[in-house]
Image: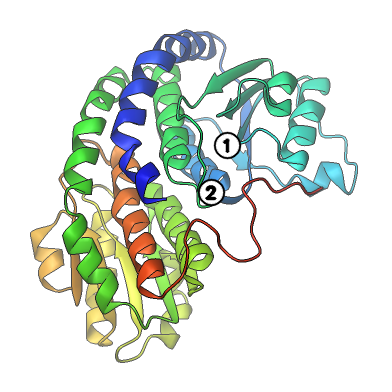
Amino acid sequence: MRREIHEQPGVMARLCERAGPQLRALGARLRARPPAAVVLAARGSSDNAALYGRYLIETLWGIPTSLAAPSVVTIYEARLRLRGTLVIALSQSGASTDIVEFLAGARARGALTVAITNRARSPLAQAAHETVLLESGPERSVAATKTYTAQLTVLSLLVAQAAGAHGLAARHRDLPGLAERTLACEDRIREVARRCRLLQECLVTSRGYNLATAREAALKLKETCYVAAEPLSSADLLHGPIAIVERGFPVFLIAPPGRAFPHLAKTAARLHRRSAATVVVSSSAALLRGAALPVEVPAVPDEALTPHIYALPLQLLAYHLSRLRGLDPDRPRGLRKITRAL
């Protein structure tokens, strides 16, 4: 897991170089003939990447987007009317049975289908009109790390091209360097993990693009550290769940500068008044000063690209916390790299 976390700057650079021309061409086609709607189908970490994709497509491209419920097709055998829509399926292995079946059904019902996967000869790749490869190399850890941020990168490159957001597309060249700088702070993250070693339960919160980061961080804490981590939008947190936060209750707050930041700063103030034990991940010096455990992240030039970078310290935190608890993050109990379910 640790080795694959540190491979991510190279994966981002390679992906931009190798998949860039394909994504520019696909983006230009979609810009010329936009779909009426977009549906994203995924499970696990890929579903968290899909959530990011939904925010990105709706905010930058203005096209209504939903996250698929594959059981609607695989269990209830619904025949969805998908002509004129774009269906994007994400799966590291390309072998998740329900995602493959959903995509194949969508293609049969008239959707334009795109697979985002790490395996060129996978069932998912064979089911799609077009396949974009993650260029990540084999991912051996059960906990997805490099393929998760590769999925984010494919989605942001594709949507930037489809929406004509050429500035965002150009700023992808900054990602490998930002990732390198973030991973260079591993000693600090190891110390934060040491201070969290007795953690049993926590909330993980953010808003906007980084709600996906909160969900992914919570998943990593669950699957590698066996921590009961509940991810919530900061807006949803204030609509009731904040009642469980008392003195010393651990809350991870992911707060990059951007449009969501003012609300996240107010949430941090509310948590401080409740004496929560906050782990704040941010580049804002003012916000970090109020944290019980600050995790500083380099400033990212575009809020839409912050999830690619903010995922990294949280991956490292989960890895080190797992090791400090005497666990093997590469072999979580009861889990396999490929999950097949209908």
Compared to residue 315, the image places residue 193 above or below, namely below
What colour scheme has been applied to the protein in the rendered image?
rainbow
Q: CA distance from mark 1 to mark 2?
A: 9 Å
Question: Which sits earlier in the primary sequence, circle 1 or circle 2?
Answer: 2
Q: Secondary structure at mark 1?
A: loop
Q: Which mark is residue 231?
A: none
Q: Residue at x 34, y 75 (%)?
A: 251
Compared to residue 152, the image places residue 134 above or below, namely above
Q: Secondary structure at mark 2?
A: helix
Q: Residue at x 20, y 73 (%)?
A: 293
Residue at the right extreme of this rendering:
77
Q: Position of residue 219 (x, y in %)?
A: 50, 60
In the picture of the structure, the residue carrying the numbered disc 2 is 45
In the picture of the structure, the residue carrying the numbered disc 1 is 92
Query: Which residue type does callout 2 highlight?
Result: Ser
Q: Is residue 187 left or right of residue 132?
A: left
Q: Are marks 1 and 2 in contact (CB under 8 Å)?
A: yes
Q: Position of residue 118 (x, y in %)?
A: 55, 29
Q: Residue at x 69, y 26 (%)?
A: 122
